[in-house]
Amino acid sequence: VNTDAPWLSLDGWRKGQSPIDLASLAHDACYVGIDLASKLDLCALVAVFPPTVGRAQWVALPWVWTPADTLVERTRRDRAPYDVWVQQGHLLTSPGTSINHDLLRPVLREIRDQFELVAIGFDPWHAGPLITDLRDEDGFDAQRLIEVPQTYPGMSVGALKLEGLVIAGEFNAGGSPLMAWCAANAVVQRDGKDNIYPVKKKSRGRIDPIQAAVIAVNLA
């Protein structure tokens, strides 16, 4: 079952947003979620930082890519200001008509160097070559590369956790308008055991960064 009402509290989402001081996160534990669901629309990597003694909120740093050559067409199709978000730095472009997953590798190396990276979660469906390169060429510990299948059992714990954080105003994505749009696009399906799984409300809506955030929160 899924409904048209947004799954995540939009009031709670707005309440949680404020500027993020990257320097203050330098020694904090960091968990990364990767959603590679589509090479043609959006691809997302979200790093989340659980609360610490000096910080009450969860913090999320999103990196989201989209193909450069189809940007104008998809801005019109999805009725989303992708072009504006690119100009503002909220959305990154990949040359051509599809997303090159190798673009995630330098970002992940930077996260490893800059923060206390604990684990990287990924849906194994599309991730094989990227994960192999991270392990064999970039020196990531295989034990930190964790499969999180996009199934009810794989996603429900993280989704329920994220839902509660957002309602409480405790999830801060730095005021990213792209993340806010994706949050508003997400609804959930439920199985017979009351597990939940985020899906998009409309075919033109995108939720990839929310899926990545669920994966990251699940690991934390």
Image: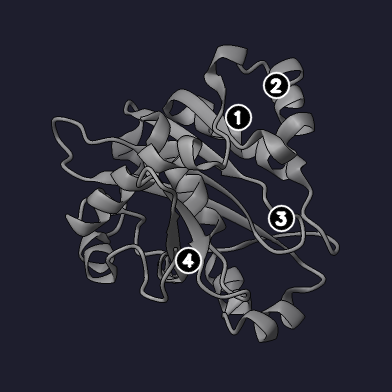
Residue 183 appears in which quarter of the rendering? bottom left
Height in image: 118 above or below 72? Answer: above
Q: Nearer the viewer, residue 158 or 173?
A: 158
Amino acid at pointer 3: Ser
Kindly identify which residue carries mark 1: 109
Mark 4: secondary structure: helix
* For marks 2 and 1 on the same chain, the one whose residue lies earlier in the sequence: 1
Q: CA distance from mark 4 to mark 3?
A: 15 Å
Q: CA distance from mark 3 to mark 1?
A: 22 Å
Amino acid at pointer 1: Arg
Kindly identify which residue carries mark 3: 38
Q: What x and y, as percent, mark residue 71?
A: 73, 74
Mark 1: secondary structure: helix
Q: Which mark is residue 182?
A: 4
Q: What x and y, as percent, mark residue 47?
A: 45, 40
Is 100 left, or right, of 170 in this rendering?
right
Mark 3, residues whose alpha carbon is within 10 Å: few (<14), some, or many (≥20)?
A: some
Q: Quadrant of the C terminus?
A: top left
Q: Nearer the viewer, residue 29 or 216?
A: 216
Identify the coloring.
one colour
